[in-house]
Structure formats: C-alpha cells, structure tokens
Image (cartoon, grey):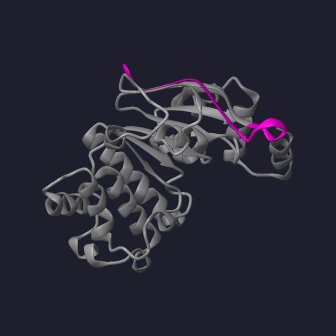
Amino acid sequence: MSSMIEVSQLNLTFGEGAKTNQVLFDVNFNVGHGEIFGLVGESGSGKTTVLKCLAGLFTHWQGKLVIDGTELEHKISRERCRMVQMVFQDPYGSLHPRHTIGDILEEPLQIHGFTDRDRRINMMLDKVGLNRAFRSRYPHQLSGGQRQRVAIARALILEPEVLLLDEPTSALDVSVQAEILNLLSDLQQESKLTYLMVTHDLGVIAHLCHRVGVMQHGKILESLSTDNLISGAAQNPYTQMLVNASRQYSREMASQVAQF
C-alpha cells in the first residue's frame, strides 16, 4: 500500500533559550491510502501536536511531512486545505456561535470559489444524517452529536482526501459516540478517505482503526496493527499497560499508569 501520509523525523520545540521545551522527538510513521491510523497515548504525549503540524496550525516544526507525495511547506496553502481537513475535539468550540449551520458550511465553499454551493451543502447534510432544516439553526440549538455531525460535514465539504480527527467523540455522551464512529466509518468507506485519528480510548481504536501508533513523552514507542494490539502482541511495556488498563481498572493499575 502506497503512503498517503509520511511523517519523518518530526521535531517541535516551543520557547527559546532557558525556556526551550521540546514536545516532539523524531516522530516517524506512515499512513497508507484509504487507511485509518490511530495515535494513542496519555494526555500531553504529543498526539494532537502531530495533527496540528500536519494541519498547518503549527508551522515551526523540523523534519519532513508528506501528503500524497507532496512535501509540505511551513505555511498553509489553498491546495493543502483542499487536501487535508481537521475535525476538532470540541464541536461547540470549533463552530462560530453566531453563524447558522448553512453559513458555516457555505464559508469554505465561498473561499475556494465553488459555484454550486446550495447543492453541496444539502448533499453534505444528507451524508452526515441531518435534514435541510438544520441550515437555519445555530450551534447552540443543536445537541453535541448534531454539532459534531456539522463539524464533520464542514471538514468534508471541500472533498479532502485526508481527515485529521482529534478525539472526535470524547466530548460526547457514550450513547452518541458509537453513532459518530459508525458515521465516520461509513464516510471513510464511501469516499476511500485516509484518516489519522488521535484518541486515548483503545475501544475507539479497536472499533475504527487499522493500525495504531503508541505515543508517550513526544515519541512513538511502537506501531502495530489493531489486531495485534487486541490480541496482546504489543512488545512495549507501556503499550501492554495501556491495553491492560483498558480492560480493567484498579488502584494497582492506576499506580502503574502513574509510574510511566
């Protein structure tokens, strides 16, 4: 399988002089065309930071980032926005509170010069399971699950090939999480999209991802298939601990997590 995403020797540092803080250390992984790759690890491990480098939200990284054979520059281009889109963790925070859903979906189409905007908006609402009456509503009038469907629609309306997903279900009720995961799975299969998903939930990885990279302290510790992760074939002690912790919770397990 050829690579859609290539991350090579990715490093990122904030601050200068004595206040220098390196947050990514020689991160390497590839994601194939049409593959769903998960990045898992504790809070602060650098998962979302990797996504923000690929999305162009951080531009002072060092290393090499490649999307579909094109090496990324240290700035956002119009072509990059068409190719790569991101869905954020908090759907309410990522949607403008004073814009209607119709306006939110129309804005990227206007920026990129699409003329058939009404048709595209209606089609995308249908794809994410919302009817056209939602066009006149505001984000505060929607449930958390509905807002995340709008965020997914906005990300997909430019027909990107890569979707970066930053814990897209963690802010939702458990009953709604499976609906959004199933929606993402259906959309990925329908359009042969490539997903890079950040999560701390191994259940989400097992449900959606083909392969997973385990991160800790800004480094990739291990990459393996989801099947190997579930079957207990992980080699790294930290990965083994994460798998055990996802199956059971105890004071002993909590103390093991704290030691890593």
* Residue 142, image quadrant: bottom left
In the picture, the quarter occupied by the C terminus is top right
Q: Nearer the viewer, residue 125 or 68?
A: 68
Most extreme residue toward the top is 1
- Image x and y of residue 189, in percent: 30, 40
How many numbered tags mark residues here? 0
- Image x and y of residue 250, in percent: 80, 52
- Image x and y of residue 86, in percent: 44, 48
Q: Please check the rendered image and state whether residue 8 is part of the magenta-colored stretch, yes or no.
A: yes
- Image x and y of residue 17, in percent: 80, 36
Secondary structure mainly formed by the magenta segment: strand
Q: Is residue 30 above or below residue 120?
A: above
Residue 150 in the figure: left or right of residue 242: left
Q: Is residue 24 above or below residue 180?
A: above
Residue at position x 56%, y 58% from top?
170
Residue range highlighted in magenta? 2-21
* Residue 19, image quadrant: top right
Residue at position x 69%, y 23% from top?
235
Q: Please check the rendered image and state whether residue 9 is part of the magenta-colored stretch, yes or no.
A: yes
Residue 87 in the figure: left or right of residue 236: left
Q: Is residue 65 above or below residue 78?
A: above
Q: Nearer the viewer, residue 162 or 60?
A: 60
Residue at position x 27%, y 49% from top?
158
In the picture, the quarter occupied by the N terminus is top left
Residue at position x 72%, y 45% from top?
245
Q: Nearer the viewer, residue 236 or 88?
A: 88
